[in-house]
Amino acid sequence: MPRSDRQYFARSIAYGVLAVLLSLAGCSVGPKYQRASASAPAAYKELTPEAAKDLQGWQLAQPNDTAIRGKWWEIFNDPELNDLEEKANNSNQSIAAAASSFLAARAMVQEARSQLFPTVTSSPAITAGRQPTTTAGTGIATGTTGTTGVSTTTTQATGTSRNYSEFSLPFDASWQPDLWGRVRKTIASDVAAAQASAADLANVRLTVQAELAVDYFQLRTEDALKQLLDSTVQAYQQSLDLTVALYETGIDSDEAVAQAQTQLQTTQAQDTAVDILRAQYEHAVATLIGQPAPAFSLPFVVLNPNPQPIPFGIPSQLLERRPDISAAERAMAQANAQIGIVTAAYYPTVTLTGEAGFASTAITTWFTWPSRFWSVGTSLAETIFDAGLRRATVRQYRAAYDQTVANYRATVLTAFQQVEDNLAGLRILSTEIQQQDAAVQSAQKNLTVATDRYRLGIDPYLNVITAQTTLLTSQQVAVNLRLQQMTAHVQLIEALGGGWGTTQLPSASSVALH
């Protein structure tokens, strides 16, 4: 066969092999991802007409009302809380850690994409050396030596030394075509992991925001209790003064004075104890906004509960609003792609390699055309026997996928539970607060009557103490119920996703291109 015909034949084979490889590169093994089903009820049980009628004095917004905004805490109209939430978004270390985790996950997508392209390396070298004279040439001499007459052979160098230099600039390339979709499945897996990490970041941010709001309202509740106990201590001091005056005039006994003193001192101790919890909540707020506790303080301000209507939506929308649900769904997609990765191990791996460059023994001819060299080749690797390793690995990853499906459905069920819990809490608290306010009014009237009868000498001071204790207890319960209402309000917003949505997840293309 003439040389030109052989070259044409070789090129035809090479082009044919390349065409086959490119056509196979469109193949992809493994199951196609389909989002697992998760049943959603048609409506929330706690928002049925029968249940909603108990929400006296405070109504939830209807499903078609304006959705929850991203800065949901602004509905409370508290400038101090707004400022703290902004600081937490910028300086909270849990949020910073989650953001770094997302950046790392996004970088892994870039690492996986790099496998779609050839790897090219170069190792230029300049070598200078001297060839020893003992290897240039040899001569043989024989004879006897010593008294024993032993024959010996010696080697003598007859050549001359030679200095030499070598200059080389090789370029090596290797590429494994993605024939069975292993690399593409790896990219899909890493993209899903990066999206799950973005959802985790949103969930951490929402959790921190809600925790900060709850801690802030608890701190303000302690301020309200402090104000209540301060005013109660003043009232008890006045009662003690009255008892002492009646004792000095002979109208009352020293027993009544002792009872009034005990009542006053016990309440003073309660008043002092409030400062412990307030300090702890203040320290918790400092940590959440990324500031050291010793350098942070909040002024004394009494809690002013102002719950606002919440657009709760319909249950099916919850699947698109909760970042933890989105993270669980993306984990399913990641696990599904990993099944394809391990399935690709059943198929052979083709590696294309090539080398080209320049080499010479003189620098003047290093980069000349005659100094060129090249080589190309291909290799195929296939596992013939692995004692069931690949089959077991596929089963392992299918089981891992089934686990993510169960986790996803459990997350959905937990989400519905949390919404229902807080809806129930708000519904019941709405009625309980009204009942407790009525109890406070009754206790106040009872104290007024008991104090008047004591002044007139009709009843002993013990009746006044009983009425005082009942009033203070009722007032403390009323303050704490309003805290529970604000806490349930925040937790309901958190359970509804805090204004987040799946549209805020980074797309696969945006994750891959960064």
Image (cartoon, rainbow, N blue to C red):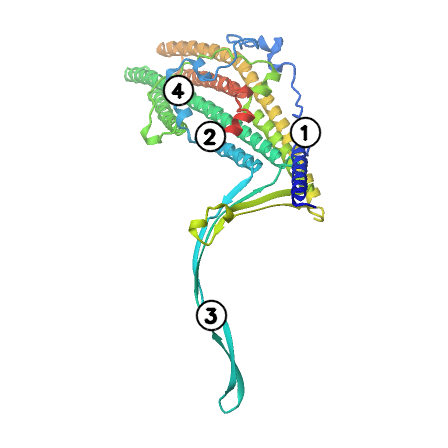
* Mark 2 in CB contact with mark 3 (< 8 angstroms): no
Residue receiving disc 3: 159
Label 4 and label 1: CA atoms lie apart by 53 Å
Task: Please state which of residues 262 and 22 is positioned toward the viewer in this rendering.
Answer: 22
Q: Picture coordinates of residue 213 (x, y %)?
A: 44, 21
Looking at marks 4 and 1 on the same chain, the residue that comes earlier in the sequence is marked by 1
Looking at marks 2 and 1 on the same chain, the residue that comes earlier in the sequence is marked by 1
Residue receiving disc 1: 32
Looking at marks 4 and 3 on the same chain, the residue that comes earlier in the sequence is marked by 3
Which amino acid type is shown beneath numbered disc 2? Ala
Which amino acid type is shown beneath numbered disc 3? Gly
Which element carries disc 3, helix, strand or loop? loop
Farthest residue, direction bottom? 147
Which element carries disc 1, helix, strand or loop? loop
Residue receiving disc 4: 220
Looking at marks 2 and 4 on the same chain, the residue that comes earlier in the sequence is marked by 2
Q: Is residue 355 above or below residue 189?
A: below
Residue receiving disc 2: 99
Task: Please state which of residues 298 and 165 is positioned toward the viewer in this rendering.
Answer: 165
| Horizontal arrangement in the rendering, residue 17 relative to residue 119 (left or right) | right
- Quarter of the image for residue 313 reads top right
Q: Picture coordinates of residue 323 (x, y %)?
A: 54, 24
Q: Is residue 339 visible?
A: no
* Mark 4 in CB contact with mark 3 (< 8 angstroms): no
Task: Please state which of residues 452 and 351 is positioned toward the viewer in this rendering.
Answer: 351
Label 2 and label 4: CA atoms lie apart by 31 Å
Label 3 and label 1: CA atoms lie apart by 73 Å
Q: Picture coordinates of residue 293 (x, y %)?
A: 35, 30
The crowding category of the residue bearing disc 3, from other C-alpha atoms within 10 Å (few below 14, some 14 to 19, many at least 20), is some
Label 2 and label 1: CA atoms lie apart by 30 Å
